[in-house]
Image: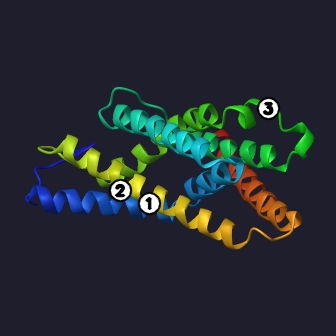
Amino acid sequence: MYAAPDPRSRLQLLRDYVELGVEHILLGIDHLLDVLALVLLVRSRGTLLWTVTAFTLAHSITLACATLELLALPSPPVEAGIALSIVLLAHELALPEHERDTLTWRAPWLVAFAFGLLHGFGFAGALAEVGLPSAHVPLALLAFNLGVELGQLGVVALVLVALALLRRVHARGRMLVVYAIGSLAAAWLIDRVLGFVA
């Protein structure tokens, strides 16, 4: 996972890996859908803060552990698990109001933490493709994680603004979004499971 010594300055390396982290979250449709589903799930700003923090903490832990080769999981099951996490969130979002007494609705931060652990392994896979400069592993890892967080917070902010603008949209419009998320994630799940089973 570690690359040869990198001639870049620390500031340039920091900038490059932050950009890489932002790019990864913005181009990772599955990660974006998971964040979108979590924002749609959580109703209060305080709970949303705890939920996003739990997601961040969890994927930071597994990203660091996988990058430093303390833990390892094969990529195909991780990717299938990420797709499954989105399917599960879409299912929860599709529940009628009177059935929303599940753990996901009562403690979204706990579910976000569990799903964040999977996403950290996914982020580590992307980082492994690029490699880390052997002399600055902690700095590059920190910068990449910071970039992922900046991208994630930007997405959360955009979703909150969009939801505020669309507050008057009928509930059916919201359900169309939920079903679109669930359908896309289910297709990924099937494709990813078939990819490592076949």
- Horizontal placement of 129 versus 183: left or right? left
What is the CA distance from the residue labelled 2 to the residue labelled 1?
Answer: 6 Å
Q: Residue at x 40, y 57 (%)?
A: 150
- Residue at the spot of label 3: 102
Dividing the image into 4 quarters, which one contains the N terminus? top left
Seen in the picture, residue 97 relative to 159 is either above or below; the reply is above
> How many other residues sit within 10 Å of disc 3, few (<14), some (14-19) or many (≥20)?
few
Question: Dot 2 lies on which element?
Answer: helix
Q: Residue at x 92, y 40 (%)?
A: 98
Front residue of 169/9: it is: 169
> How many other residues sit within 10 Å of disc 1, few (<14), some (14-19) or many (≥20)?
many
Quadrant for residue 198, please give it. top right
Instruction: Tell whether label 1 touches label 3 (CB within 8 Å).
Output: no
> How many other residues sit within 10 Å of disc 2, few (<14), some (14-19) or many (≥20)?
many
What is the CA distance from the residue labelled 3 to the residue labelled 1?
Answer: 29 Å
Q: Residue at x 86, y 68 (%)?
A: 170
Q: Position of residue 139 (x, y in %)?
A: 20, 46
- Horizontal placement of 28 versus 2: left or right? right
Q: Earlier in the sequence, mark 3 or mark 1?
A: 3
Quadrant for residue 11, please give it. bottom left
Question: Dot 3 lies on which element?
Answer: loop
- Residue at the spot of label 2: 147
Q: What amino acid does circle 2 point to?
A: Gly
* Residue lying furthest top: 70
Q: Position of residue 161 (x, y in %)?
A: 60, 68
- Horizontal placement of 125 versus 191: left or right? left
- Residue at the spot of label 1: 151
Q: What amino acid does circle 3 point to?
A: Thr
Question: Dot 1 lies on which element?
Answer: helix
Q: Position of residue 14 (x, y in %)?
A: 20, 56
Front residue of 46/181: it is: 46
Q: What amino acid does circle 1 point to?
A: Gly
